[in-house]
């Protein structure tokens, strides 16, 4: 068996230990005689799996009791709609547009009410986080929306925006559980599992209880499907219908892996160390350069390019990048190609990427630099 270092932005690397455990339990989950995939979501044994997952997530993130944890489906994209459908009581919300996912959320919200762009970093290809200390927020805005870590562009809100007392909704898909967070600062945190916590198919929503609208009185959109009302799943512990059972099981295992390894403080330290190594190398490289304003750099997604100051010809530069991607793949470093919308390269170094993987990448880049820099 050969495992590569997988720098994919998502679905992404999972802890090897977790995968092995799942493999061991594949045919017979702890004496049940069946795989978790084959199990009723109403069974006692599955109930323990989902309850444990919730309990461990609450411990990891120190989630207060007035917040619900929901395991849903439909990916982050479904939340782009579900958030406004449930929260737009005044039919108005503020969006901070810092990349492709924030743009999609902002556009989706326009179907349900007035989505106001409060700030944007589009002018410089989303390479920074705009100043959010004094945004033009009006009293009637139901919430302020951010995409906290921009998976494609590699920026992150190191500091949360000043929402002027309004509810903050955050898409944490690509930074979920990468560092300790103060949940009380948010109305909703949501995250698609496939970036940092599990297989695709599960989305985790952490929502303050008082924001869950009653289906008749305060619900925004008449005709909202039952499945898209937070209340439906909140009242049924995410078991109104069949949840993504196997995905939740895998997320639960990752939560236990994090707890066993010292929780979010410990993983944060490791993430800072990994990211610093890579950024330090990029800052000193004669061939490669990062694309993001230093103060807004993500710990999870590191985009970089061949420096246009070194290779000025666009075609030559594109050739050099293609060569890098091809040769890195041959060296067991997978999925370093940048997002199709921006090109270049991107190394996603989520929780489960071992430090050794980052070192291997840096060593490969050094070697490539030596061989290709004239
Ligand atoms: C990947 C990603 C999305 C899209 O997720 P889907 O599960 O494909 O809907 C949205 N937001 C962020 C921050 C992401 O990284």
Image (tube, grey):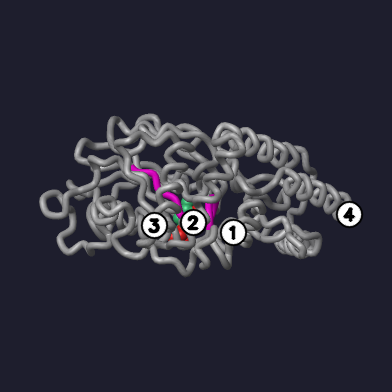
- Residue 57 picture location, percent across and down: 45, 43
* Mark 2 or mark 3, whichever is nearer to me: 3
Residue found at x 40% / y 59%:
77
Q: CA distance from mark 4 to mark 1?
A: 42 Å
Residue located beneath label 3 in the image: 44
Residue receiving disc 4: 371
Sooner in the amino-acid sequence: mark 4 or mark 1: 1
Quadrant of residue 283 within the rendered picture: top right
- Whether residue 48 is visible to the viewer of this picture, yes or no, is yes
Write the residue at 38% across / 62% down.
Answer: 41
**Residue that carries the numbered disc 1 in the rendered image:** 22
Q: Which element carries disc 2, helix, strand or loop? A: helix
Please give the label number shown on residue 308: none
Q: Position of residue 139 (x, y in %)?
A: 21, 36
Instruction: State yes or no: discs 2 and 1 in contact (Cβ < 8 Å).
Output: yes
**In front: label 4 or label 1:** 1
Task: Measure how far apart labels 2 and 1 are at the Cα level.
Answer: 9 Å
Q: Which residues are magenta?
A: 188-198
* Label 2 CA crowd tier, 10 Å (few <14, some 14–19, many 20+): many
Question: Assess mark 4: CB under 8 A from ligand 1?
Answer: no
In reply to whether residue 196 is colored magenta, the answer given is: yes
Dot label at residue 249: 2
First in residue order: circle 4 vs circle 2:
2
Measured in 3D between alpha carbons, the distance from the residue under mark 4 to the one under mark 3, in whole angstroms, is: 59 Å
Residue 106 horizontal/vertical position (percent): 35, 53
Which is nearer the N-term, disc 1 or disc 3? 1
Indicate which label's residue lies in the foreground, 4 or 2.
2
Q: Secondary structure at mark 1?
A: helix
Which type of secondary structure does the marked residue at label 3 adopt? helix
Q: Report the front residue among 202 and 299.
A: 202
The residue under the point 49% across, 54% down is 193
């Amino acid at each position: 068996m050969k495992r590569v270092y997988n720098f994919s932005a998502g679905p992404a690397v999972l802890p090897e230990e977790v995968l092995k455990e799942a493999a061991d339990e594949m045919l017979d989950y702890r004496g049940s005689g069946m795989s978790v995939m084959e199990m009723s979501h109403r069974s006692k044994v599955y109930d323990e799996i989902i309850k444990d997952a919730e309990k461990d997530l609450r411990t990891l993130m120190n989630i207060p009791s007035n917040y619900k944890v929901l395991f849903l489906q439909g990916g982050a994209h479904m939340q782009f709609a579900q958030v406004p459908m449930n929260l737009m009581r005044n039919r108005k919300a503020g969006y901070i547009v810092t990349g492709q996912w924030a743009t999609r959320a902002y556009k989706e919200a326009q179907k349900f009410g007035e989505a106001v762009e409060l700030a944007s970093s589009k002018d410089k290809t989303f390479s920074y986080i705009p100043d959010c200390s004094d945004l033009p927020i009006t009293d009637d805005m139901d919430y302020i929306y951010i995409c906290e870590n921009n998976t494609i562009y590699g920026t992150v809100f190191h500091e949360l925006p000043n929402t002027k007392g309004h509810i903050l909704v955050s898409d944490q898909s690509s930074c979920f559980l990468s560092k300790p967070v103060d949940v009380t600062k948010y109305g909703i945190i949501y995250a698609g599992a496939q970036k940092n916590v599990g297989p695709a198919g599960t989305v985790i929503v952490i929502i303050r209880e008082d924001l869950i609208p009653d289906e008749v009185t305060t619900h925004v959109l008449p005709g909202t499907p039952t499945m898209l009302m937070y209340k439906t799943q909140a009242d049924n512990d995410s078991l109104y219908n069949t949840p993504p059972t196997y995905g939740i099981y895998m997320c639960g295992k990752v939560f236990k892996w994090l707890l066993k390894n010292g929780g979010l403080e410990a993983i944060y330290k490791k993430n800072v160390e990994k990211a610093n190594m890579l950024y330090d190398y990029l800052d000193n490289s004669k061939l490669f350069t990062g694309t993001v304003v230093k103060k807004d750099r993500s710990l999870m997604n590191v985009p970089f390019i061949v420096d246009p100051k070194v290779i000025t010809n666009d075609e030559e530069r594109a050739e050099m990048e293609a060569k890098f991607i091809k040769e890195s793949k041959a060296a067991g470093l997978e999925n370093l190609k940048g997002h199709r919308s921006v090109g270049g390269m991107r190394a996603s170094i989520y929780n489960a990427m071992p430090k050794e993987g980052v070192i291997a990448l840096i060593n490969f880049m050094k070697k490539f630099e030596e061989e290709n820099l004239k």
